[in-house]
Amino acid sequence: MVADVSTSGLIPAQTVADAVAGDTMAFARIVRAHHDDMARVCQVICGDPDLAQDATQAAWPIVWRKLGTLRDPEKLRPWLVSVAANEARQLVRRYRRDRVVSIDLADVRSDDSDPGRRWADDTLVAAIRRLPAEDRTLIALRYVAGFDATEIGRTVGLSSSGVRSRLARLVARLREEVDDE
């Protein structure tokens, strides 16, 4: 049998094919490899850990049903994150959460003693919290999931240039807000 995950971090095409054919163990390998990425993106979009987990969990049955529609197994991760992001946006709309309440950050830096850096991080998180869900989605897909403009565009229904210009405006707005505070 092929290893669960290739050296590049991708699920092998055969594992995807096995899952499409109904192999629950192959699907479990996909879940194990991608659940955390999906949950992180949902966390940024929802701003609530419980709601983010709900969105991620709601995405998996959709993935199971529609996995056969995935044309290119190399695009599995972007497709999965897109499904999760869509579920997160729907939950945010459903619960009418236009603003984020809190975002917990895992702090893994060794320079935590610098209060200036902590203040800037806290200020940035507060500025992100104030963004509408659609803007948080763009930020999450670009800076948490690492999607490029083309992948983001496919996910949210914008052109690549539209994504780039919106992200540029968002980043400029966030910089301005952080500098003002």
Image (tube, rainbow, N blue to C red):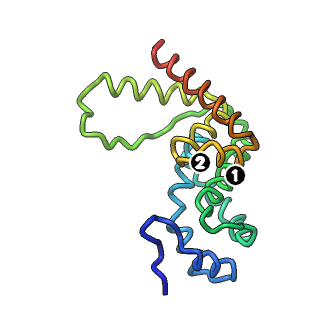
Whole-percent x, y for residue 49 in the image: 54, 47
CA separation, marks 2 and 1? 8 Å
Residue 146 rendering spot, x and y as whole percentages: 53, 47
Q: Which residue is mark 1?
A: 87
Q: Residues within 10 Å of mark 2 (few under 14, many from 20)?
A: many
Element type where label 1 sits in the image:
helix
Q: Which mark is residue 97?
A: none
Under mark 1, the amino acid is Glu
Task: Kindly identify the residue that appears in the image at 29 percent across and 24 percent down.
Answer: 115
Rendered residue at 62%/38% (across/down): 138
Q: Looking at the picture, how far across and down is residue 72, in whole percent?
A: 67, 67
| Badge 1 density bin: few <14, some 14–19, many ≥20, Cα 10 Å | many
Left or right? Give the position of 133 relative to 175.
right
- Residue 181 in which image quadrant: top left
- In the rendered image, the residue lying farthest to the top is 180
Residue drawn at the location 52% of the way across and 49% of the way down: 40
Among numbered discs 2 and 1, the one appearing first in the sequence: 2
- List the single residue furthest toward the bottom: 1
Q: Is residue 94 left or right of residue 110?
A: right
Query: What's the residue type where badge 2 is placed?
Result: Cys
- Left or right, 51 with respect to 105, comes to right
Label 2 sits on residue: 42
Q: Nearer the viewer, residue 165 or 145?
A: 165
Residue 161 lies in quadrant = top right
Residue at the spot 63% in from the left edge and 34% down from the top edge: 164
Locate residue 36, reporting x and y percent: 50, 57
> Is 84 drawn above or below residue 44 in the view shown?
below
Q: Are marks 2 and 1 in contact (CB under 8 Å)?
A: yes
The vertical placement of 75 against 148, above or below, is below
| SS of the residue under disc 2 | helix
